[in-house]
């Protein structure tokens, strides 16, 4: 196959290890499609992989990039739900920072009507993650309250909008007054600046004894104890990252007294069948909100493929609001 441009690194390290290179266009399996990539999303797992802390699962591309949008240029023998020249966004198992990538057909979704390729590329990793953790594991229901930590991250922006569109109330934490305003503009009922306020105290004051029903936590560490404190009876706490550390000391008595569920998950190791099931749920329940404008894209910055290192630096600064995208 002909060469294609990719983002590559020889050894793990800081953002400046990323460089442009070339390799062969990937072949596809019978259940896969080949996508000519128009845009790729940047995610925190990319940062971890670049640093050497998040190796790709067996059989996955060693290249960075977990979500793309583009045009299908080849179809595997077992694929019957897409055609060549269809425009799709896809959750990929790696290899998104490239001109072409292979993707299981079950992990592809149509580009929402009215959305650009850059906007569509910002969807898969975050929307798959939020559905799997907030709606599947967390079982968030209409009328319940969701607490989202990191409300202006890609995950946070998706969680706020998906929950509000589904009829839930949202409380978000964020690291500045500007970010808190962004959260409320997205639909959050309450946004708490965790650098100047204690979210535990604020929630207890504002919501008295009711508490929150579902908590999406990417911080962990000392937040685990506080999450248990503000949780309602029968609440579900779902951890998806450990930015505040993976160790803490706490009493499990609140879990017993409130009948809490504390769980955690990661998206990348899920099977192709599990990811396909998430895609089907998104298409049925969430895609109509994207096409009606009830959920809107939030793009913080756009970079070209040769600016991947700058894109990673912005991600690591945590100063952005929304998604960071590479245009190929």
Image (cartoon, rainbow, N blue to C red):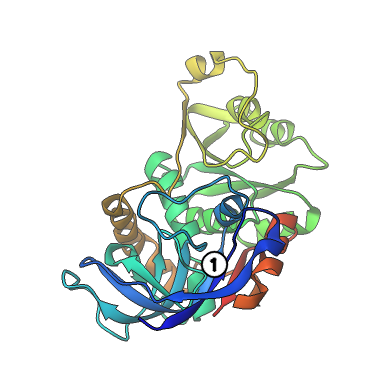
Eyeballing the image, is 68 above or below 168?
Answer: below
Q: Circle 1 is placed at which residue position?
A: 41
Q: Which of 147 and 144 is in front in this view?
A: 147
The image shows residue 163, relative to residue 36, as above or below, that is: above
Residue at 57% x, 58% y is: 43
Badge 1 element: strand
Q: Which of 184 and 28 is in front in this view?
A: 28
Residue at position x 63%, y 26% in the image: 247
Residue 208 sits in quarter? top right
Percent coordinates x, y for residue 9 in the rendering: 59, 62
- Furthest toward the right, the residue is 196
**Residue 61, image x and y in percent?**
42, 60
Res 44 → quadrant: bottom right
Q: Please state, as top left, top right, bottom left or bottom right, where the C terminus lies in the image.
A: bottom right
Question: Residue drawn 26% across and 52% down?
Answer: 273
Residue at the image position 50 percent from the left and 63 percent from the top:
65
**Above or below, 301 relative to 257:** below
């Amino acid at each position: 196959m002909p060469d294609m441009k990719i983002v590559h690194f020889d050894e793990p390290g800081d953002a400046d290890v990323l460089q442009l290179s070339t390799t062969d266009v990937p072949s596809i399996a019978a259940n896969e499609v080949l996508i000519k990539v128009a845009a790729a999303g940047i995610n925190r797992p990319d940062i971890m992989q670049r640093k050497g802390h998040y190796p790709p699962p067996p059989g996955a591309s060693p290249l960075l990039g977990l979500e793309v949008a583009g045009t299908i240029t080849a179809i595997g023998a077992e694929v019957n739900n897409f055609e060549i020249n269809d425009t799709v966004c896809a959750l990929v198992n790696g290899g998104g920072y490239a001109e072409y990538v292979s993707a299981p057909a079950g992990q592809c979704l149509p580009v929402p009507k009215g959305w650009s390729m850059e906007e569509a590329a910002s969807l898969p990793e975050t929307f798959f993650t939020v559905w799997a953790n907030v709606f599947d594991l967390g079982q968030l229901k209409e009328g319940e309250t969701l607490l989202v930590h990191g409300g202006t991250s890609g995950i946070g922006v998706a969680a706020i909008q998906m929950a509000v569109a589904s009829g839930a109330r949202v409380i978000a934490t964020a690291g500045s007054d500007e970010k808190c305003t962004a959260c409320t503009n997205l639909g959050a009922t309450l946004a708490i600046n965790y650098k100047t306020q204690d979210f535990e105290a604020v929630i207890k004051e504002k919501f008295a004894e009711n508490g929150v029903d579902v908590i999406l936590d990417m911080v962990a560490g000392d937040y685990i104890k506080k999450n248990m404190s503000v949780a309602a009876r029968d609440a579900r706490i779902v951890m998806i990252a450990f930015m505040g550390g993976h160790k803490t000391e706490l009493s499990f008595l609140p879990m017993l007294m409130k009948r809490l569920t504390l769980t955690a998950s990661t998206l990348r190791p899920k099977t192709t069948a599990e990811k396909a099931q998430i895609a089907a749920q998104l298409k049925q329940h969430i895609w109509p909100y994207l096409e009606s404008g009830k959920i809107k894209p939030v793009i913080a910055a756009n970079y070209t493929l040769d600016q991947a290192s700058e894109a990673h630096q912005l991600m690591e600064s945590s100063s952005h609001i929304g998604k960071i995208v590479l245009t190929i």
